[in-house]
Image (tube, helix red, strand yellow):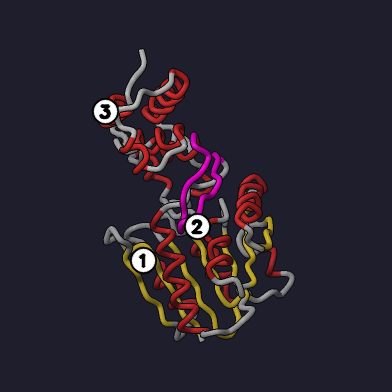
Amino acid sequence: MSKKVFEALKWASSFLTEKGRDENAGELLLCHFLGMNRAMLLANFREELSADVWAEFERAVLLHGEGEPIQYMMGYEEFYGRRFTVNKEVLIPRPETEELVYGALERIKRLFGADEGLRFLDIGTGSGAIAVTMKLERPSLKVVATDIARESLEVAEMNARALGAEVQFVEGDLLAPFLSTGEKFDVVLSNPPYIPVGDIETMSVVVTEHEPHRALFAGEDGLDIYRRLMEQLPRVLGERALIGFEVGAGQSEAVSTLLAETFAGAKVDVVYDINGKDRMVFAEIG
């Protein structure tokens, strides 16, 4: 039985609400299958869907009801106004991370002015969203990005090519690749795994059963990666440097303390995201 656009959306909304999912997911999926933006979709509210589109849409909504992220079904997510390919090997980029990028760009301008050729490092790049965006927003940066997983780097490399960003990708565990070479960086950003392992019990299956655990969890208190970075960062930073971390809500005080203890005299500040959560910690050194 064929359905009109508005009927399909109404069905999806009530089904997803019942399943405890985001009811707006139906609209995003239908836009994707019809190749329309939201305005076009609304303009075609009373049009009939073809049998093929309805079948694809119904299947996708049912899958999302079971927990499959819609970004993996569509194969992309928007980040900082650009479309990034995503699959099960990478974390889906979040709006909060856009705020980390924005905050870093503002601070680079203030700290380094028009300096050319600053060396920038993204640790645990995943889809490449941070590294690629930083290169495109400030083309004079020399951008390097690392990840422990070759599968993630393949996605990041694909995104860099597609978006025309010159980024050097390095496979390795955190800063290990640079500790032996003596390479130095002026700006380091990271959105590392920061979720305490115990939180898996209370989290949505959309995240825990589909996104890569290596990109999510970091020990009992979620701070394992930050602790390891404190041991390594002093050896790879220039005399004047900027560090920016995304953190889990409630972790900013602990991460700020780690930074202040590691870099005496650093200016450390916590930034709250659009939802009022303590989400970013920046340290200005030198």
Quarter of the rendering containing residue 58 = top left
Q: Nearer the viewer, residue 283 or 85?
A: 85
Q: Quick one: label 1, few (<14), some, or many (20+) residues within 10 Å?
A: many
- Tell me whether circle 2 and circle 1 mark residues in contact (CB < 8 Å): no
**Residue 4 image position (x, y, % from top left):** 32, 23
In this figure, which residue is indicated by the disc labeled 1? 252
Look at the image and give the residue range highlighted in magenta: 73-88
To which quarter of the image does residue 151 belong?
Answer: top right
Q: Is residue 33 above or below residue 246?
A: above
> Separation of disc 1 and disc 3 at Cα?
41 Å
Q: Which residue type carries mark 1?
A: Ser
Secondary structure type for disc 1:
helix
Look at the numbered disc 2 and give the secondary structure of its residue. loop
Residue 104 x %, y %: 46, 71
Magenta-span inclusion, residue 208: no
Residue at the image point whose x is 28% and y is 24% from the top? 7
Q: How far apart are marks 2 and 1 (CA)?
A: 14 Å
Disc 3 is placed on an element classified as helix
Q: Mark 2 points at which residue?
A: 192
Q: Badges 3 and 2: C-beta atoms under 8 Å apart?
A: no
Query: Label 3 is placed on what type of residue?
Result: Lys
Q: How crowded is mark 2: few (under 14 residues within 10 Å), some or many (20 or more)?
A: many
Q: Which residue is drawn at 39% across and 41% down?
A: 200
Q: Which of marks 2 and 1 is nearer the N terminus?
A: 2
Pick the residue in front: 211 or 172: 211
- Which of the two discs, 1 and 3, labels the residue nearer the N terminus? 3
